[in-house]
């Protein structure tokens, strides 16, 4: 049996043979196109009756035998028939038998893109049938088959004897060494009709060492994009779950839909059945993912009690177009209990969201209607107090530019929020605005706007912020707020060699009345407030509509940017906000609770693609001490790349609670090193730096990947504890033989 490693032609193919073949093929195709386009083909069939009319031949020398009906061609011979192309040193074509014999550096290109190399071939029946000796095939994915001999049948099947298959490249320096892995078989059949490659009496070899034997093995050829079958399994070991085997099976139901079944088996006796279904419609896409298991019943504290129970999850999302204006969709997330997803390492979310929606966009008009349902997965979550939002609708309009470039805006919002336990609220909001952007001859950029907003609320059992223990509010309430804004910018640009500098001072004045946040109005959508550089120049720094920023105020700062012609850049911004008097709308620790705010800013340095440094900060206006620090550094090359992230956020009090958010301080570090062409190393560490904190998680991994093989292993530990979810050590292995379907 021929050894794939002994065929030096594969190594030569990467150099001389491949280049020669490609040049010849490209030349042939160009010539064919030219001749056909000018309707003056040089096909010998047009000049000689002994050639079929579907044969196109080029050669340095052509000889005709009129009596025998034979054409002999020598020197750079190229023959095309029925979409197949043969390149050889010499050929003999028998017109009566429709038989073609080729010798010397023979190459055969199939219509599918496959290329076969042989010492000699004999083809007939429009080159569909024939015999090939000392065959080497390069498939469309660059994998190769080498065989002693082969038989072609009707252009759809190639039967190869004593053959070797491998997608692995041979070493240029050591072409006789075996590839990383290969399959040797007494017989290999490539069926172009079913698009399969089958192996009879086959051995799987790694570095020339036989490891596995099978009497028959089959996989799709490279032209198959999707086909039902088992996918590569994965293996892992967990200190809490034991050894895990995941064996996914892919089901190609139809061109527009498929499914994957992925059961998980554990040595502890547990079995988790999971899968995913996907379908593409003419107007959208649908996905469903779920899992289920039957395991020990747990109490509320995560302790095992008598009996068993079903646990599982269901995720689904869909997105569909109605017409050019309208589309609709949904996102559905639900779990049987709040620890299941983390217990079986399916998801690490702390909240599941279900969101059906419909939206439309037409010019300057936008409309959206949503509903939101939440499932809390943290131990402190009380599902009865988690809100249901139905509906949440909004409409916005931006007019076309009018007088002096001015334009008008209109925004409406409707929200109904209710709980099984606690406060309910319903809100209707309407805001209209007029905006005028302009620029003076001296380069000054001005923006002015006038707006009027009205909010109407109906509330039940809303906690009174002034007396949260005994007093609640119910009934109708509302507010009206006019706002005027004037903003000035003056960008200054200077070019210094290969660097462009931009310096831009910014001053923004806002007029609005005091108040606007009565105790009867709950804060449902503006609790995640954070004062930083991104909202320094915002008309309102709250993320939602339930809270208004009131009173006259001025925002000022300066921006700077340096941009190199090679792509490097440095940008910075710093600023502050001031108001006529203190505003108790913002809680303690927010940075806006005093007349003068903290200083906020950002610095980004990215002089090249190899490293960058980003720094975001909030500094106490009096002591200049950091109340918020975010530092992110990424640097290095593929050989060694490091990322370090650090975040510090001081405690911020909420409106009702006196505790608010505690101090948060965290560091994340990751390292990736591709220390050779094929080997890479990764590591990551996450630590909570608060007084009671410590390491949250860490992991390290090693990966080998080349054109035909993937091996990866990862070991890590999580330190989180939540009832049945305990600190866990995990070891994962993944092995993949590429190109096998």
Image: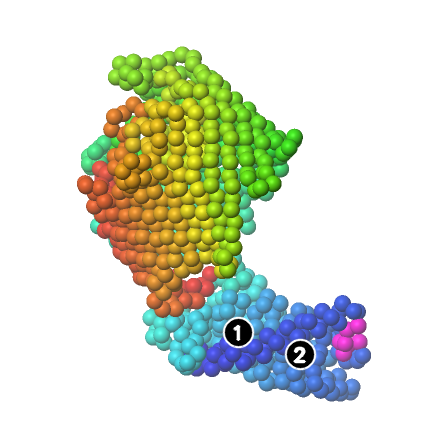
Residue 362 visible? The answer is: no
Measured as percent of width and height from the top left, residue 554 is found at 43, 31
Q: Residue at x 47, y 25 (%)?
A: 511
Task: Tell me the number on the disc at residue 593.
Answer: none
Where is mark 2, residue-wise?
78
Secondary structure beneath label 1: strand
Q: Is residue 236 left or right of residue 88?
A: left
Where is mark 1, residue-wise?
137
Q: Is residue 562 above or below residue 169?
A: above
515 vs 87, nearest the viewer: 515
In the image, the segment drawn in magenta is: 40-46
84 vs 171, nearest the viewer: 171
Q: Is residue 31 above or below residue 668?
A: below
> How far is disc 1 from disc 2 in space, using C-alphas?
18 Å
User: Which quadrant is home to the N terminus?
Assistant: bottom left
Residue 178 visible? The answer is: yes
Residue 197: within the magenta?
A: no
Badge 1 or badge 2: first in the primary sequence = 2
Residue found at the far top of this picture = 475
């Amino acid at each position: 049996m021929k050894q794939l490693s002994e065929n030096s032609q594969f190594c030569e193919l990467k150099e001389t043979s491949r280049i020669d073949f490609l040049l010849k093929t490209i030349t042939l195709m160009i010539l064919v196109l030219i001749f056909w386009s000018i309707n003056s083909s040089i096909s010998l069939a047009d000049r000689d009756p002994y050639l079929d009319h579907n044969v196109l031949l080029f050669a340095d020398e052509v000889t005709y035998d009129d009596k025998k009906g034979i054409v002999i061609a020598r020197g750079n011979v190229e023959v095309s028939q029925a979409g197949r192309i043969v390149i050889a040193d010499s050929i003999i074509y028998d017109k009566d038998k429709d038989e073609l014999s080729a010798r010397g550096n023979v190459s055969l290109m199939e219509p599918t893109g496959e290329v076969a190399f042989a010492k000699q071939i004999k083809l007939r029946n429009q080159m569909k049938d024939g015999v090939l000796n000392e065959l080497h095939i390069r498939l469309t994915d660059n994998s190769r088959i080498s065989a002693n001999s082969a038989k072609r049948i009707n252009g759809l099947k190639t039967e190869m004897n004593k053959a070797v298959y491998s997608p692995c490249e041979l070493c240029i320096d050591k072409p006789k060494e075996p590839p990383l892995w290969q399959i040797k078989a007494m017989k290999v059949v490539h069926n172009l009709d079913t698009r399969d490659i089958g192996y009879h009496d086959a051995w799987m070899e790694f570095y020339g060492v036989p490891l596995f034997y099978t009497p028959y093995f089959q996989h799709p050829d490279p032209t198959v994009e999707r086909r039902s079958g088992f996918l590569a399994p994965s293996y892992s070991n967990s200190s809490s779950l034991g050894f895990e085997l995941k064996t996914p099976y892919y089901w190609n139901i139809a061109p527009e839909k498929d499914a994957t079944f992925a059961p998980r088996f554990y040595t502890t006796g547990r079995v988790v059945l999971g899968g995913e279904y996907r379908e593409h419609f003419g107007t959208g896409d649908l996905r469903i993912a779920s899992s289920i298991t039957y395991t020990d019943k747990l109490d509320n504290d995560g302790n095992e009690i008598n009996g068993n129970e079903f646990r599982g999850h269901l995720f689904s999302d869909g997105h569909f177009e109605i017409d050019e204006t309208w589309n609709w969709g949904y996102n559905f997330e639900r779990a049987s209990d709040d620890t299941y997803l983390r217990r079986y390492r399916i998801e690490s979310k702390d909240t599941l969201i279900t969101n059906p929606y419909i939206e439309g966009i037409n010019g300057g008009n936008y409309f959206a209607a949503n509903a939101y349902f939440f499932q809390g997965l943290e131990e402190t979550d009380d599902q009865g107090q988690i809100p249901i939002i139905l509906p949440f609708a909004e409409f916005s309009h931006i007019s076309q530019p009018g007088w002096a470039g001015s334009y008008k805006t209109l925004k409406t919002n409707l929200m109904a929020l209710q709980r099984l336990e606690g406060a309910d609220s319903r809100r209707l909001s309407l805001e209209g605005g007029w905006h005028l952007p302009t620029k003076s001859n001296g380069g000054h950029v001005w923006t002015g706007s006038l707006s009027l907003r009205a909010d109407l609320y109906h509330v039940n059992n809303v906690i009174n912020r002034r007396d949260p223990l005994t007093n609640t509010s119910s009934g109708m309430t509302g507010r009206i707020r006019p706002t005027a804004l004037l903003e000035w910018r003056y960008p200054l640009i200077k070019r210094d060699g290969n660097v462009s500098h931009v310096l831009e001072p910014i001053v923004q004045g806002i007029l609005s009345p005091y108040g606007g946040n009565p105790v009867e109005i709950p804060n449902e959508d503006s609790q995640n407030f954070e004062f930083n550089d991104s909202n320094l120049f915002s008309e309102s720094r709250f993320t939602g509509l339930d809270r208004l920023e009131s009173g006259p105020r001025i925002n000022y700062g300066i921006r700077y940017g340096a941009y190199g012609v090679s792509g490097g850049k440095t940008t910075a911004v710093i600023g502050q906000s001031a108001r006529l008097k203190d505003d108790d709308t913002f809680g303690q620790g927010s940075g806006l609770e005093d007349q003068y705010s903290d200083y906020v800013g950002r610095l980004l340095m990215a002089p090249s693609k190899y490293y960058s440094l980003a720094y975001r900060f909030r500094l106490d206006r009096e002591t200049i001490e950091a109340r918020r620090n975010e530092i992110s550094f990424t640097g290095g090359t593929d050989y060694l790349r490091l990322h370090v992230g650090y975040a510090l956020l001081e405690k911020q009090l909420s409106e009702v609670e006196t505790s608010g958010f505690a101090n948060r301080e965290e560091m994340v570090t990751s390292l990736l090193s591709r220390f050779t062409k094929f080997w890479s190393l990764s590591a990551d560490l996450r630590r909570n730096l608060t007084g009671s904190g410590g390491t949250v998680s860490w992991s390290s991994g090693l990966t080998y990947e080349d054109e035909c093989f993937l091996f990866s292993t990862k070991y890590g530990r999580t330190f989180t504890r939540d009832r049945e979810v305990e600190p866990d050590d995990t070891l994962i292995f993944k092995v993949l033989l590429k190109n096998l379907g």
